[in-house]
Amino acid sequence: MTGLAALGTELARQLSLIGFGGADWTRPRSHADGHVHDVIIVGGGQSGLAAAFGLLGERVSNILVIDESPEGFEGPWETYARMITLRTPKELNPIDFGVPALTYRAWWEAQHGAAGWEAVGKIARGDWMDYLRWYRSVLRLPVRNETRLMRIEPMGDGLHRLHLEKQPPLIARKVVLATGIQGGGEWHTPAMISDALPRHLYAHTSEPVDYAAMQGKRIGILGGGASAFDNANMALTLGVAEAHVFIRRKILPRINPIRFMERVGFTGRYPALSDAEKYAVMASFLGHNQPPTNDTFERAASWPGFGLHLGSPWTSVEHVDGQVRVTTPQGSHDFDFVLLSTGLVSDPGLRPELADVATHIARWADHFTAPAGTDNGLIDAHPYLGPGFQFTARDAASEHILHGLFAFNYSALISLGLSASALSGLQTALPRLIRGITDQLFLDDRETLVADLIAYDEVEFIGEWPRPVQGEAA
């Protein structure tokens, strides 16, 4: 047996060695409307899959992962992501929970050998998605695809009803929103774009874009983040004649604070900071527009049709004769299509699935007031989460409404740092999430569990004293 088959066998052995799984300890709940899951995880990408594995390791198996995408296309990797390789160093192990045979390296070496691993500079985007597909399959994780969450309805008694698109609702004690970078709010489209242009003339970098249908066309890209250069390179690769990137700043962003955070423990220890320290750290972090990697920039810049316009914010946008006219302080440009690399806004009030509960969710603005002149509206709108990624309430009267709801997505950035918002944060964030969920499950059942313990009378020791004399009747 060789390759992935042998790795699967070794993984099973390692899981047995660490005592993975076993009988559930949670107390089943019932409801007249249907089965009650202990946990439903919304999102079947890397965070959702890893959360499911972590729960199974804690002997919580009455779980379900749902994802709106077809199987094998969860997350951004085969949909809208345009980078050629991951930006994360290949040595990081974000979702294996310390099990060697579950690491990306083990998966890669099973197919390409140790020399193949040494030859890898950065992990290719498609290879990472193939690893996630294997991860889901080899662990037999309970995922239901093409299942879209529409709304979460608090039912009382610690239960939540998940209303789905064109499917019967589900019921869960705990709901984890493992919904990725956009799952805590929405991608930002400036009003100057949406008010001026018909929808078919623009897209956000978070959307799938058919560049192959734009061969010979000219496109303009607003924003200088990494995704702008990823998309410029992809567009030019697929035959777009010209791709112009416009940046407000007069110099390209050059500093990636994530690299510093990875080196000095910020990824794991950030939650221990005070609110004032977190606010200052994240104000600085958000002020650094993530730069493109050097190889991504060089690939894009090498194309004859690539243009970079520094110190060129878009001052106006017009729809003229079927094209987009962009005006900057440096002049005007006409494009067949424009793309927005304008980031996102994290605010629970923007999420349709949270419509029933959003007004009760505490924001950072409810807990911390920044010193005059240092306030940041983007930070203030983020949810103020508890240490296990649980939503917290604006007042005590609302706590029961939010009990059991967890935000394991980009909106956790301010409260818990590089957690579900970056691969480099998952290794330390996942145990926090799993503990938060399982602690709640245990405390919710504590009366029953304590009573059962007090009443427990299963005999284990059967020795006798004085010991019977051999040959005499006992």
Image (spheres, rainbow, N blue to C red):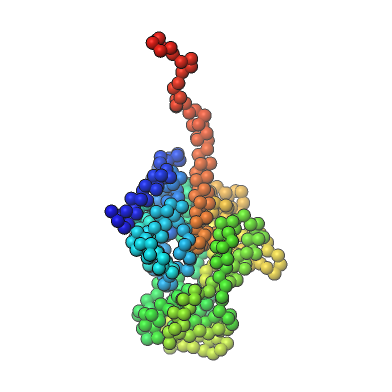
Locate residue 308 relative to residue 120 in the image: left or right: right
Residue found at x 38% / y 65%: 115
Q: Is residue 432 visible?
A: yes
- Residue ranking furthest to the top: 472
Q: Quadrant of residue 314?
A: bottom right
Question: Nearest the camera: 294 or 194?
Answer: 294
Residue 211 location in percent, x, y?
38, 78
Residue found at x 52% / y 45%: 439
Residue 434 location in percent, x, y?
49, 50
Residue found at x 50% / y 35%: 449
- Residue ranking furthest to the left: 1
25 up-or-down from 333: above or below: above
Residue 279 location in percent, x, y?
64, 63
Question: Nearest the camera: 269 or 249?
Answer: 269
Q: Is residue 38 visible?
A: no
Q: How many marks?
A: 0
Residue 144 location in percent, x, y?
36, 55
154 up-or-down from 368: above or below: above
Residue found at x 55% / y 86%: 328
- Residue ranking furthest to the bottom: 331
Q: Quadrant of residue 124?
A: bottom left
- Residue ranking furthest to the front: 115
Q: For the C terminus, which image quadrant?
A: top left
Locate residue 338 relative to residue 69 in the image: left or right: right
